[in-house]
Amino acid sequence: MASNKQSAFRSFASYASTAIPTPAPVEQKTIFPKKYGGKYTVTLIPGDGIGPDIAESLKEVFRAANVPVEFEQYNVSGLTSEDSDLFVEAMASLRRNKVGVKGPLYTQTSLTEPESMGVTMRKDLEMYASLSLCKNIQGVDSRLKSVDIAIIRENTEGEYSGLEHESVPGVVESLKVITRAGAERIARFAFDFALKNNRKKVTIIHKANIMKLADGLFLRTCRDVAKEYEHHGIQVNDMIVDNTCMQLVSRPQQFDVMVMPNLYGSIVSNIGAGLIGGPGLVPGCTIGREYALFEPGCRQVGLELLNKNIANPTAMLLSAVLMLRHLNLDSYADQISSAVHQTIAERKVRTADLGGSNTTQEFTAAVIANL
């Protein structure tokens, strides 16, 4: 690496031990989460749609496993603009605790509604790296096997910059912002991730053939960063985003680590979820210099499933396992991860998305029984 400063690393996992680089120098102490009386305090935002059900599942499993974590819960919703004060409190909690768990938050399309709460969180707390882990799970039938992809998405720039205006009636300009600094830090995150987890290949996703300046800058910057890792033997290639979508559904085994701008990451992570059995199986996290937020890697809200007790809590539970690794609570992470995978592998208790008819509570009870 060009910098002489050491990087701080933390280990946390979903299926096996996955180490994710924390982009902060070791001398910076403010990144460490708050711990009182032997317990960590973590901000919990259940969210909308399936969020309350899967958040309750998470709390039940943590209680059963005696995990030394206490939640500060904020029932923020994107369905109403009346929660602005509560959202401010939730943000203050995240700043204080450094670590949070979040369900999906709904974003309205009306011009009169404020910016997405999720986007606001990531921008304000500078959580620039989003990770989704798409991997086949034993006990879940899927058309394609041997899928094991880490999708790394830049989280604060690109089409999500929120810079839109109507030049004249009927003409809207939406600005896509790509900076060298933003591209460099997400590229470095991706290569550090590959190096730390013994991944062999990084694929840069872009549309530089059309957006020659914006995506061209992203591609060139990623290639420059790749040169710093040549001596580690990590393979590097790049692929245009439309071809990437076709390759994902035909031969996903060619991909290992993928790094890309914001919008492409949203699309690719949803395709990845479809490859392995649905959004209920994809853990993820959003991380920055100081803060880490753990949430399902495929951000599907599921408003129609609100309070129906049929959602699959696997993605939420495995995202919480990532959090436990982040907090160095490895034994609890191993216990919960093993219980979740054993429950799925046994094929006895299955939610609707896995072809069964069991409820969220029944699935949660099965996981607890397997702890």
Image: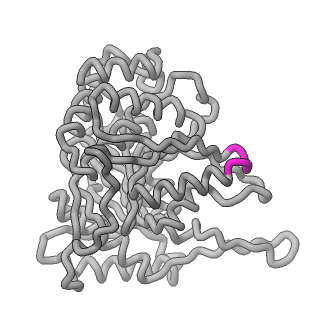
The answer to whether residue 115 is above or below residue 232 is above
Which colour style is shown? Answer: one colour
- Camera-nearest residue between 76 and 253: 76
Q: Quadrant of the N terminus?
A: bottom left
The residue lying at 47 percent from left, 18 percent from top is: 359
Percent x, y for residue 291? 40, 61
The residue lying at 40 percent from left, 32 percent from top is: 59
Percent x, y for residue 368? 30, 22
Q: Is residue 286 magenta?
A: no
Seen from this angle, which residue lies furthest front?
37
Identify the main secondary structure in magenta.
Answer: helix
Query: Residues in magenta?
Result: 79-83
284 to the left or right of 166: left
6 to the left or right of 80: left
Residue 247 visible in the current orientation: no
The answer to whether residue 363 is above or below residue 151 is above
Q: Quadrant of the C terminus?
A: top left
85 to the left or right of 291: right
The residue lying at 26 percent from left, 58 percent from top is: 20
The answer to whether residue 279 is above or below residue 32 is above
Percent x, y for residue 332? 22, 37
